[in-house]
Image (tube, helix red, strand yellow):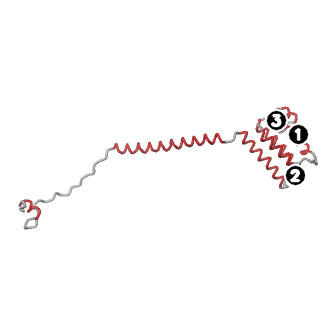
Amino acid sequence: MPVPDRLTGALLGRAGGALSADPAPPEIIAPPQYSIAWVILAVLCVLVILALVVGTLKITRAIEKRIAFRRRPSDVEALKAEFLRAVNDIADRHEADQLGAREGHHELTGVMRRFVRRTTGHDVTSQDLATLLADERTRAVGVLIGDLYEPDFAMASDRDLRESVRRAREVIRTWS
């Protein structure tokens, strides 16, 4: 099959080994330039993602706080727990023979007076028993303190500190 002469000469070369057409000199082609719109779009996408993450965190933390706030004890409940711990401490020290019955009754009277002061705002640490009994709110504490006076101030008493501690716990738990 005959091949055109020009093509044959270009492909196979001439007798001298030179090609008929010289290649073009190497040329550096610059890469195509990206539009600034892509950079702006990328920044906007990052900002939207950050806003979604921050918004989600704020919403979930607010929900968690609201749930925790509903579950937290009220101020009165926290005070009750604090004074129940103080009464339990007196009972524990008495059981460990670190505190006598008289001293325990004395401390119990002080704890109950501080309890009334913290819950009502009235300083009853030095008020007499009649004042405690006169107020409807402090009457239960007044009755308890009246019963604690005999073992508190007597040189010897047959009152059991465990019973006094039980009654103090009951007064604190039923306080409103």
Which of marks 3 and 1 precedes in the sequence?
A: 3
Q: Position of residue 112 (x, y in %)?
A: 81, 42
Which of marks 3 and 2 precedes in the sequence?
A: 2
Q: Position of residue 81 (x, y in %)?
A: 74, 44
Q: Residue at x 50, y 43 (%)?
A: 54
Instruction: Classify mark 3: helix, strand or loop.
Output: loop
Q: Position of residue 63 (x, y in %)?
A: 58, 41
Which residue position is annotated with label 1?
146
Q: Residue at x 92, y 48 (%)?
A: 158
Question: Residue 173 sits in which quadrant?
Answer: top right
Question: Residue 126 sits in which quadrant?
Answer: top right
Instruction: Classify mark 2: helix, strand or loop.
Output: loop
Which of 16 and 1 lies nearest the eye of the viewer? 1
Count of all numbered marks drawn on residues in the image: 3
Which residue position is annotated with label 2?
100
- Badge 2 density bin: few <14, some 14–19, many ≥20, Cα 10 Å: some
In this picture, residue 165 sits left or right of residue 42: right
> In the orientation shown, which residue stands out farthest toward the front?
1
Which residue position is annotated with label 3?
138
